[in-house]
Image (tube, rainbow, N blue to C red):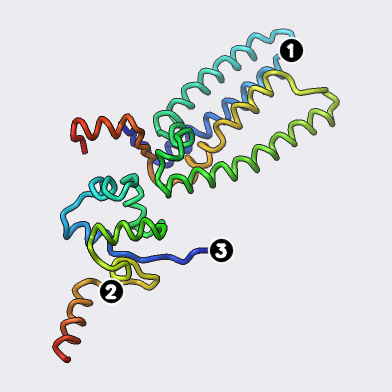
Amino acid sequence: MNHQISKSNRRNWIILNLLSMTFIVIFFYTGKYFEQPYLFFAGGAISLVLLIISFKMGFVKTKLWRLVHTKKEDLDERQILVVLNALRYSYVVFVMFCLVIIYGFALVNKGPINVLVAACLLYSAHVLPAVIIGWTEKRSVTVKTVNNIILIAYFNLP
Amino acid sequence: MKSRKLYNRISVLRKEKNVSRQELADVIGVNFQTIGYLEREEYNPSLDLAFKISEFFGLPIEIIFSPQPLKPLFEEIIELKKKIGGN
C-alpha cells in the first residue's frame, strides 16, 4: 500500500524529524547545567517522541526508507540513479557535518563526543539519503518488492 | 556531461494501445512511476530501456524518441501520405 503524501507534507515531516534530533541534543546539554534539569529532560523526551512520530510519517509511510534500503536488483534504473545520487550527496554532507562536530568539540575543549552525539551522528548517517530523496523527489515514492510482485501476480492486482 | 532532453510519444502510443502505465511498466520491467517520469520527459531512458519500449510498441526508436520536439502523430501521417501520394 502506498501512502500518498504531498511533497510539502513530506518536507515538513523531514524538517520536524531533523529538528527533533537537534532539540534532543540541545535539551540534554542545557539540562546538565541547570539546578532543575527535569524540564529539559521532559523537553528531550517530547523531542524523542516527535522524532519517532516524524520518522514514521516522513520516512516509513512515504516509502523513502524502503527505497533507500531496497536491494539494487529490486529497483529500476531510475530509482537506482535517484538512490545513488542521494548516497553521494549524503556522504558529502555527513562528512562535513562530522568534521564540524569533531572540530567544534575539540575547539571548546570538550574532549571526545559523548554517546548522545554519536547516536545522533549514526542516526543522521542512516536518514540522510532518505532526507535528500524526500526533499528532491517531485512525486510520492513507490517501491515494488519481491513480496508485492508475488501478491500482484497471484491475485492479479493492478 | 549534461544530457539533453529527449522528447517521446509514449503517452500517445500507450493510449492508442489502451495500455495502463502499470501494464507497460510490468512488461518492460520498471516501476510505473518511471513510466510517468518518461511520459513527462523528466527522465531519459537508458538505451536498453528505449529498445524495450520500442519492441513493446513495435515501432522504431526514432518514431518514439527524439532530441527535438515531436510533431503530433497526425501531422506526421499527413506528411507521409503526401510523400507517398507524391511518389
The three-letter code of the residue at mark 3 reads Met
Disc 1 to disc 2, how far (Cα)?
Answer: 72 Å
- The answer to whether residue B16 is seen in the rendering is yes
The structure residue drawn at horizontal position 53% and vertical position 29%, both measured from the top left corner, is: A17
Residue B2: image x %, image y %? 53, 63
Query: The residue under label 1 is which amino acid type?
Result: Phe
Same chain for the residues at labels 1 and 3, yes or no?
Answer: no
Q: Secondary structure at mark 1?
A: loop
Q: Are marks 1 and 2 on the same chain?
A: no
Residue A8: quadrant of the picture: top left
**Which residue lies at the image location 21% right of the left edge and 82% below the top edge?**
B79
Q: Amino acid at mark 2?
A: Lys
In the image, are marks 3 and 2 on the same chain? Answer: yes
Give the letter of the chain under mark 3.
Answer: B
> Is there CB contact under 8 Å for labels 3 and 2?
no
Q: Earlier in the sequence, mark 3 or mark 2?
A: 3
A156 lies left or right of B1: left
B38 to A44, vertically: above or below: below
Is residue B44 visible in the rendered image? The answer is no
Circles 1 and 2: CB distance less than 8 Å?
A: no
Query: Where does the C terminus of chain B fall, quadrant-wise?
Result: bottom left
Q: Quadrant of residue B68?
A: bottom left
Kindly identify which residue carries mark 3: B1
Describe the element under mark 3 as helix, strand or loop.
loop
Q: What secondary structure is marked by label 2?
A: loop
> Could you say which disc has been placed on residue B71 in the image?
2
In the rendering, which numbered label is found on residue A34?
Answer: 1
